Amino acid sequence: MTEPLVEVAALSKHFPLGGKNFFGRRHGAVLRAVDEVSLRIMPGETLGLVGESGCGKSTLGRLLLRLIEPTDGNLIFNGAEITRLKGAALREVRRSMQIVFQDPYGALNPRMAVEDIIAEPLIIHGARQGPGTRKQVASMLDRVGLPARALDRFPHEFSGGQRQRIGIARALILSPRFVVCDEAVSALDVSVQAQIVNLLQDLQREMGLTYLFIAHDLSVVRHISDRVAVMYLGKVVEVAQKHAIYAAPLHPYTQALIAAVPASHPADRSRGKRVRIAGDIPSAFNPPSGCRFHTRCPYVMPVCREVVPPLVEPVPGHHVACHLIDASPAGAPT
């Protein structure tokens, strides 16, 4: 059986916003951005991560790369525990873990030429600037669909889609195994989105990449993903193959997300049963007890207000955290 490339167990990130008292203890509000999330990402797959704004998607992506430190939990990459790695050991692992940011305008240094932007990861990891490095950067530019003459130009001379290609080239110049795409197409026009998604898929096949694809556009996620994970208020509430998520979602929140996707045709019934949810997502400073979705769920039961539902596997490969599902935990991590 293939081992997961990335595995997290009960991973949490809490941001304390208060100060410390005389005894060095923190006081004040705590933002529970990610709360006891467990996931597996297999080599070569694309795991889509969806949910409302503020649910913790981007925070989880940065936790997987150790760009921010977890409050609790464990992170395993390629079979090795990396939660507490530091210094040279962490830097070596980071060669294999990269990120493509959402904003193609803010993610690039406007004072650096394209060659220097893309070569920077190589220099950080010990390469020397010279003809060899320039040739390597030019080759990567060609792979993302930009000409070699772009090497000496600056970010402001490119369109949004071209800037995102530069960001992708920078992320892939070290030949990583795992890439977090954090809303990588949401700031682009629809036609350009399709081009970038197709590019990411081509590069995945060529380089054997594994993606965590964070997005709020469920149509894009459906196109690019193998499996889909749904987050709500810092917790993962459902994980399954994309065809199962879109054809037969089990969690009421997932059902509402799928039903909200605009139909391509009035007769299109593929979105399934429409579930209406009222109100806004609760505050992560004071999340509801029990199931965090119970304040908006149309099927809420008394147990939902008191008991946190475990992530169970009622159907092989389909995990859901909901008291409506009559199943026992399968025992295997998601």
Image: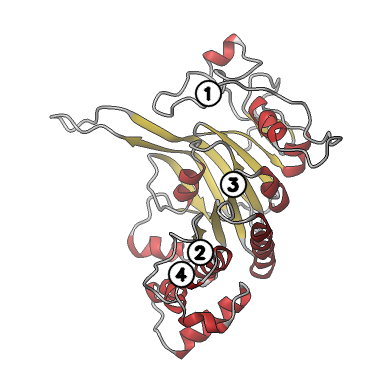
Q: CA distance from mark 1 to mark 4?
A: 44 Å
- Which residue is pictured at 69% across the width and 62% down the height? 198
- Going from the N terminus, do you reach mark 2 or mark 1 first? 2
| Local crowd size for mark 2, using a 10 Å CA cut-off: few (<14), some (14–19), many (≥20) | some
Q: Which residue has dot 1 on it?
A: 292
The spot of residue 245 in percent (x, y) is 72, 37
Q: Amino acid at mark 4?
A: His
Residue at which label 2 appears: 96
Which amino acid is tagged 3?
A: Ala
Q: Is residue 334 visible?
A: no
Contact, mark 1 vs mark 4 (Cβ under 8 Å): no
Residue bearing the label numbered 3: 215
Residue 10: mark: none
Name the spot of residue 312 as percent of width and height, x first. Answer: 65, 29
Q: CA distance from mark 2 to mark 4?
A: 29 Å
Q: As shown in the figure, which amino acid type bears the numbered disc 2? A: Ser
The quarter of the displayed image where residue 139 is located? bottom right
Furthest residue in direction left, as rendered: 22
Return the x and y of residue 99 as percentages of the image width and height: 50, 59
Pointer 3 and pointer 1: residues touching (CB < 8 Å)? no
Instruction: State the separation of the CA atoms marked 3 and 1.
Output: 21 Å
State yes or no: discs 2 and 4 in contact (Cβ < 8 Å).
no
Residue picked out by circle 4 = 156
- The residue sitting at 51% across, 54% down in the picture is 102
In this view, the mark in front (1 or 4): 4
Q: Earlier in the sequence, mark 2 or mark 3?
A: 2
Q: Nearer the viewer, mark 2 or mark 1?
A: 1
Element on which disc 1 rests: loop
